[in-house]
Amino acid sequence: MAPVSPGKKMARETVREPSMSSTPHYVLAQGDGPLVISIPHVGGAIPDDLRNRYTSSALELEDTDWHLDRVYAFAEQLGATVIAATVSRYVIDLNRPATGESLYPGMISTSLCPTETFRGAPLYVEGREPDAEEVERRIGHYWRPYHIALKAELARLRDRHPHVLLWEAHSIASCLPRLFHGKLNDFNFGTSDGQSCDPEVAAGAVGAVRGSRWSWVLNGRFKGGFITRRYGEPAAGVHAVQLEMSQELYMDETPPFAWRAEQAARIVPLVRAAVEGALTAVRGLTAPRPEALLAG
């Protein structure tokens, strides 16, 4: 993964755990604006000490949120803080609760340490799936540091601004029959059915694509994952919006998952406009109650 460049005005931190492997946990580029962009599934690294557990097909990493660091390369211009995973979601899914419960009860969805791809193919060599002890190890070394850093950045920016926007950046293949019927909408906004942000913030994001040639939905199949639901706390001045984009908008959905520059040139301005629309709404909100700030 090529993380978003932090530029001259942003502090960059690469966090790694030497006792585990040389693979860093995440890359953090700090900005001063009321915006955090979290990209928890862009990572493509499988630590060396785990690679022999995975099937050869798993190592193609087909369920990665490919190239989202390039899609959101405008982040620095908005004064955003960007936190981006480097480790693959096949190791641990940073957008799932550490307790392991399903975000979509009754529906097929991936788990904290998935054992199958989105299409149902096994990720692990038979008998090499992670046991409970291994899952706990990955939580401690990969999941928890990302969330500690994300919460710290939200608190840092919340100290400086009356409201902060947390933008959860995701993408997925446009057709995955095991997860959803038919073809996915181009832009899938999630606000946990309106619970993770002020309505004006959601309206600001959706307004960028409303009336465009591309399809969109608010709180459809993807309503927001763990990060959106956990950290979106409008009463405390933190407003979370998830955008799940169809990957065919900007890349090839088959190996080697190439970036499509011509298509991306049409899509990136829309993504930026959606972020800016939500950010403008955030800046226009009145200050929340002091006693509500980032509780819990």
Image (cartoon, grey):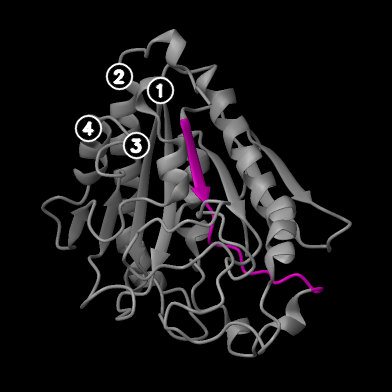
Magenta part of the chain: 35-49
Instruction: Give the residue type at disc 3.
Output: Ser
**Spatial CA span between label 3 and label 1:** 10 Å
**Spatial CA span between label 1 and label 2:** 9 Å
Q: Please state the horizontal and vertical placement of residue 195, each as a whole percent of the image.
A: 30, 36
Identify the residue position indicated by label 1 in the image.
Answer: 237
Category of crowding for the residue at label 3, using alpha-carbon neighbours closer than 10 angstroms: few (below 14), some (14–19), many (at least 20): many
Q: Would residue 132 be found to the left or right of residue 71 on screen?
A: right
Q: Mark 1 or mark 4: name the one nearer the start of the chain.
A: 4
Q: In the depicted view, which residue is nearer to us: 111 or 101?
A: 101
Instruction: Give the residue type at disc 4.
Output: Pro
Identify the residue position indicated by label 2 in the image.
Answer: 285
Instruction: Give the residue type at disc 2.
Output: Leu
Q: Please state the horizontal and vertical placement of residue 83, each as a whole percent of the image.
A: 59, 46
Q: In the depicted view, which residue is nearer to us: 124 or 243?
A: 124
Q: Please state the horizontal and vertical placement of residue 38, each as a whole percent of the image.
A: 51, 47
**Spatial CA span between label 4 and label 3:** 9 Å
Identify the residue position indicated by label 4 in the image.
Answer: 199
